[in-house]
Amino acid sequence: MNQAPLQLWDGVLRRLGSETSSVSLEAWIHPLGVREEPDRLVLLAPNAFHRDRIRTHFASRIGRSEEH
């Protein structure tokens, strides 16, 4: 990771905010927790349903966001 992990997550949130509705951000992205590990960020969903929804509908966008 070139950036500090939490800075990276802030950038992901800003990018998602520009391409995702505020309702979706509030319902699906903002409830995620973030845990910092030495070489990555781990996103923590409040439950399995939420995790599956993120994987299905947002994972590719989150991945694209962190590449920029």
Image (spheres, rainbow, N blue to C red):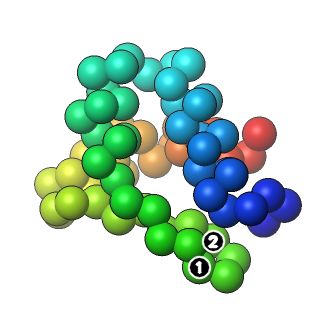
- In the rendered image, the quadrant that contains the N terminus is bottom right
Q: Is residue 63 left or right of residue 17?
A: right
Q: Is residue 12 left or right of residue 31?
A: right
Residue named by callout 1: 37
The structure residue drawn at horizontal position 59% and vertical position 31%, both measured from the top left corner, is 14
Occupied quadrant, residue 24: top left
The structure residue drawn at horizontal position 67% and vertical position 82%, both measured from the top left corner, is 38
Q: Helix, strand, or loop for circle 2? A: strand
The percent coordinates of residue 31 (x first, y second) are 29, 48
The structure residue drawn at horizontal position 63% and vertical position 71%, both measured from the top left corner, is 40
Amino acid type, label 1: Glu
Amino acid type, label 2: Arg
Residue named by callout 2: 40
Occupied quadrant, residue 47: bottom left
Do the numbered discs 1 and 2 sit on residues whose CB atoms are within 8 Å? yes
**Residue most extreme to the right:** 2
Tally of marks:
2
Q: Helix, strand, or loop for circle 1? A: strand
